[in-house]
Amino acid sequence: MIINGVTIDKTFAEAFPMKATRAIITAQNEKWALISAQAMTGFATSVIACGCEAGIERLLTPEETPDGRPGVSIMIFAMGAKGLAKQLETRAGQCVLTSPTSALFAGIESGKPIPLGKNLRYFGDGFQIAKKISGKRYWRVPVMDGEFLTEATTGMVEAVGGGNFLVLAESQPQALAACEAAIEEMRKIPNVIMPFPGGVVRSGSKVGSKYPALGASTNDAFCPTLKGVTKTDLSPEIESVMEIVIDGLTKEDIDKAMRVGIQAVCELGAANGVKRISAGNYGGKLGPFHFHLQEIMA
Amino acid sequence: MSALTFSLKRRTDQRVDMSPLVCQKLQDLDPSQIAAIELQNGKRRVRVDELFAISGWDTQDILIDGGFNKLDFIGKELDGGSITVHGDTGAYLAINMKSGSIKVTGNTDIYAGCEMKNGYLQIDGNAGDFLGGALPGNKQGMKGGTVLVKGNVGARAGDHMRRGQILIEGNAGDYCGSRMLAGTIAVMGDTGRFLGYAMRRGTLLLWNQPQLTATFNDCGSHTLAFLPLLFSSYKALNSRFADTNLAFNRVRRYGGDMAETGRGEVLVRI
């Protein structure tokens, strides 16, 4: 399959079941809601070393938030329920509770309830106040700038993590420009995050390493500087490869995000140095979710 | 009209225990069985059809027409369904109510919403003393649900209240929120003496500056984030509480009762 001069490989991305949750952070203005959200979703690019994958889903207008202030919707993905709950709680405690003027609300009503502010309330040292409003439990924790308002729980649902595609280009700036165009479109899709810095990862990995202690190492088949010394997957004109990883609440959400992302890349086309779109998989043996690129773009 | 309607035939001299006439107890009964239920009336027991003309069939939608101030225990332990009273009610309206809704167009006597667990109680007129309170000797009053009073309420509203909310459009009598354990009481009108007497936790939300005892301490003026959420939860009510022009998020906060644990609060609109 070729779109605007860009070859779409006959391959697939392989993804895994994860647990996910969503929270809504509001603040006095968008600037501070965003600062808090960025802190909460920081150092959360990959479950390999961060414990979770997190990202900003989108900005929310005051009309969309529970307390009528500007807000940010963030999502956190982890491999297990326990890990997700721990990450949510520690991040909320260190990054939202601490952030001036912030308030924290549930972003998912369904699924299993997990603590959001339920345990952060103890920071109030006995001065905290519970309020049940419209069937939901909130905590008012006295803090130095006034009160930190937080919903007690949010919902945890089954989700999918690790959807991806690779952008192969003739130069590094062209690969990055293509990825930036893709991310801009993909951020408009609800229920997905792209957890890596700016949504783009330049160090895609393969399973295993020559060093026994490491479970993952550089994906040498897609490293352009190794074209002559390893079993490469790159043609001679490819000088840079970048990857976009997507976590989503459902397979359909990731499908949608991949489609608009690849479409944006293809719109730049071969004229802008983009030559191929590929994807990372483990032979289909590890992850139950397969995203076939040509089917998605059909 | 499909609502199961009990139209009062005559006013009795003695009080009537209306507790058998709740939705869950009537749901499997046919009209003749309902008519044969005996109600305690003073020291006598009288059949329902001796006091009321019965019409309609929907046992989950009960209408009591011609209510007066000796009909006690209306909606006792109500567990789903709705009861509407045209007129006044006696004491213990909605006592121990579990779910469902009760609406009264007139006034109610003492202990309305007493130890209520959940559900919705609306009183269009005035309510007597101990609204949402605990029975004498009991340690916890209202434990959940919403009580809306469009008129005034007597003394000791929310006495020993544990959870839920009492919304009062008019004035509240003395000792409003006394011995309160938690929950919210909102009063749009004036409040009497000894507001929040011995309250441990909970919120008294006021539109007008109260006369506070020395055991409530001024905590200053604040903008509280939970208030917009609270007021937006009132939007569906048929009440002045649904009026966004009357909502606010800026309050003077008084902490107390310091003679108790001091974890309660009186919030006054500024």
Image (cartoon, rainbow, N blue to C red):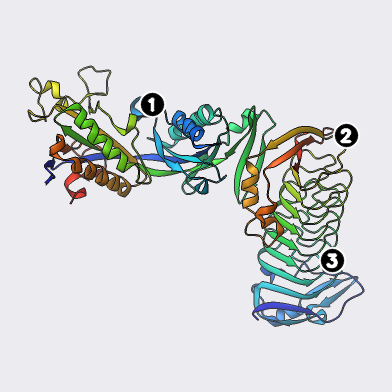
- The residue beneath circle 2 is B214
Q: Nearer the viewer, residue B35 or A31?
A: A31
Residue B88 locus on image (x, y percent) = 82, 69
Identify whether B22 is placed above or below A198.
below
* Residue type of the residue flagged with mark 3: Gly
Residues under numbered marks 2 and 3 in contact, where contact means CB atoms less than 8 Å apart? no
For residue B35, above or below residue A104:
below
Residue at screen point 68% across, 69% down: B23
Which residue in the protein does label 3 denote? B90
| Location of residue A125 with respect to A112 vertically, above or below | above
Q: Disc 2 residue type? A: Ala
Q: Residues within 10 Å of mark 3 (few under 14, many from 20)?
A: many
Q: CA distance from mark 3 to mark 1?
A: 64 Å
Which numbered marker is on residue A50?
Answer: 1
Judged from the image, the secondary structure of the residue bearing numbered disc 1 is helix
| Labels 2 and 1 positioned on one and the same chain | no
- For label 2, the SS is loop
Residue at (77, 69) in percent of width and height: B105
The answer to whether residue B259 is left or right of residue A297 is right
Residue visible at 72% across and 61% down in the picture: B121
